[in-house]
Every structure is written in structure tokens, then in C-alpha cells.
Amino acid sequence: MQKVIIIDDEAPARSLLREYLSHYPELVIIGEANNGVDGIKLVHEFKPDIVFLDIEMPGMTGLEVLRHLKESPKVIFSTAYDQYAVNAFELNAVDYLLKPYTRERFNRAVERLEVRQRQPLDSLHALAESLLKQERQIYPARILVSSGQKLIAIPTASIIWINADGDYSNMVTDKQTYLSNFGIGQLEEKLDPELFIRVHRSSMINISKVQEIFKYPASYDIRMINGDVVRVSRSYLDKIRDITF
């Protein structure tokens, strides 16, 4: 038996890992965490053999989790990083699952665990430090959203704007609108602030998708490239002024 811990802030991603791992009775899940801080506590307490670790988590990223580990489990990253980070993982013999991944890709990662040695702790720390120095990479290039009865990954750059829908959010792209399991506050932490800015308590925009801005004495309206008009509330006016000339 090998002990497994899952650290991922996305509930659907944890559910998918549970489903895939259920086909491997020798791999026993002993704990799950939806954030980095709790994940570190679990690893230190239960000393797992294997950790499935998401990289893009608000608050504390998976790389920061890796940097704080005092044990050296076998780590399989799940990531929406671009090719640069994938190359770094391969050079350091660290396995990864590039979201969205298939059952076949998951199976290959598990098969590699059988022949892979645990990475020395200093090697894992060095990898984390190397990637953390390039802060632009902590923001996901893709994000999982609901589409009917399945989850799909869409490029974050394709999102035009986002509006809150209770505890969830609607992501508007040029093709269709998708439902995200993340609230708008979580997305504000998760997405690149150089690209996405909050303009209202219930909406965010992709500044690269702005078509025109209408200025009024106490508010602005922003027309996006798809024709949608998003209201800027008074408390967020300064953010828009910062990006206009």
C-alpha cells in the first residue's frame, strides 16, 4: 500500500483524481486539502508516499507548498502552465499532469511512479525556487469550466469578462458563456492582475478585450469586443483611470 494525499483547490479536480485512483487499490487516499496551508499540515502529519499537487492555488501556490515540505514524497503536479514550466518539470524528473488530462495520461503517470525514485528534498526545493522567481508563471493559462455534463479547459486569454452568479461565476468568451465553480473573489486572486481587473463587486473585465469606454461624471461604462456593456462602480473608478491615458 502507498499513501496518497491530494492538494487542489478545485473540487471537480479532486473528484476526478478520486475516480481515477479508485482503479488502483494499492494507492490509498489518506487525506485531501483545498489549499496549500492545510496541504502542508497533512503532509507533515501523515508523511504520504505520493502527493498530487495543484500549482495554481490562491493564497499559497503548489510551488510554495513544495518549498515548505520537510519530507520528500513522490510528487505529481497538476498544472495549466505553459511549455516553459513543463520543460522544467521534465528536466528535474518530476511528473506532471497538464490540465485537462485524460485517464490514459493519468495511468502513465501512475506507472512511472513504480520506477521513479523519490526526489531528494533539496532538489524539490531548488525546482520550486527556480519557478517562483518567474512570478508571471503563477497564473494559469487555462481554467476548468462546466459545459453541460463535463468539464473543459478554456484559455484564460479568451475570457472577455466575468460576472458573479451567487457563489459561482459566468465567464463570457467570444464563443459562449461558461459556468465556473469559483466565486468572483477567488477568480480575482487566481487570474493575472495584469490582464483581469475588478470593475464592480459582481464583475471583472479582461482589459485586452475592451472596445471603448464611456465616461460619465460619477461612473464609467465599458463596451467589450463582443458588444456587452459592463458598468464600473464608483469604488473601482481609479482602476480604470490607471489604464487610460
Image (spheres, rainbow, N blue to C red):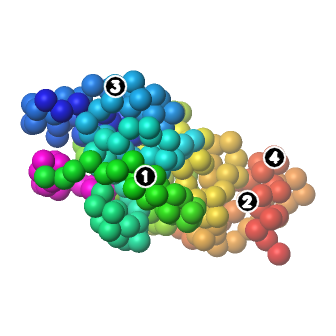
The disc at residue 122 is 1
Q: Earlier in the sequence, mark 1 or mark 4?
A: 1
Look at discs 2 and 1 and give the one toward the viewer: 1
Percent x, y of residue 139 = 51, 58
Quadrant location of residue 132?
bottom right
Identify the amino acid type marked 3.
Answer: Phe
Residue at 18% x, 33% y: name it: 2
Name which of mark 4 and mark 3 comes first in the sequence: 3
- Find out whether the residues at labels 4 and 2 contact each other: C-beta distance under 8 Å: no
**Main SS of residues in magenta:** helix
Q: Nearer the viewer, mark 1 or mark 3?
A: 1
Q: Is residue 30 above or below residue 101?
A: above
Residue in the foreground of this view, choosing between 172 and 181: 181
Location of mark 3 (residue): 46
Mark pair 4, 3: CA separation: 46 Å
Work out how far the residue at label 1 is from the one at label 4, CA to CA, in angstroms. Answer: 46 Å
Q: What stretch of residues is rendered in magenta? A: 95-114
Between label 4 and label 3, give the one nearer the viewer. Answer: 3
Q: Which residue is mark 2?
A: 221
Residue count near mark 2 (Cα–Cα under 10 Å), binned few <14, some 14–19, many ≥20: some
Q: Is residue 101 visible?
A: yes
SS class of the residue under badge 2?
strand
Which residue is under mark 4? 235
Q: Which structural element holds mark 3? A: helix
Q: Are marks 1 and 3 in contact (CB under 8 Å)?
A: no
Which quadrant holds the N terminus? top left
Q: Amino acid at mark 4?
A: Ser
Report helix, strand or loop for mark 4: helix
Q: Position of residue 6 (x, y in %)?
A: 32, 36
Does label 2 or label 3 sit earlier along the sequence? Answer: 3
Q: Are marks 4 and 3 in contact (CB under 8 Å)?
A: no
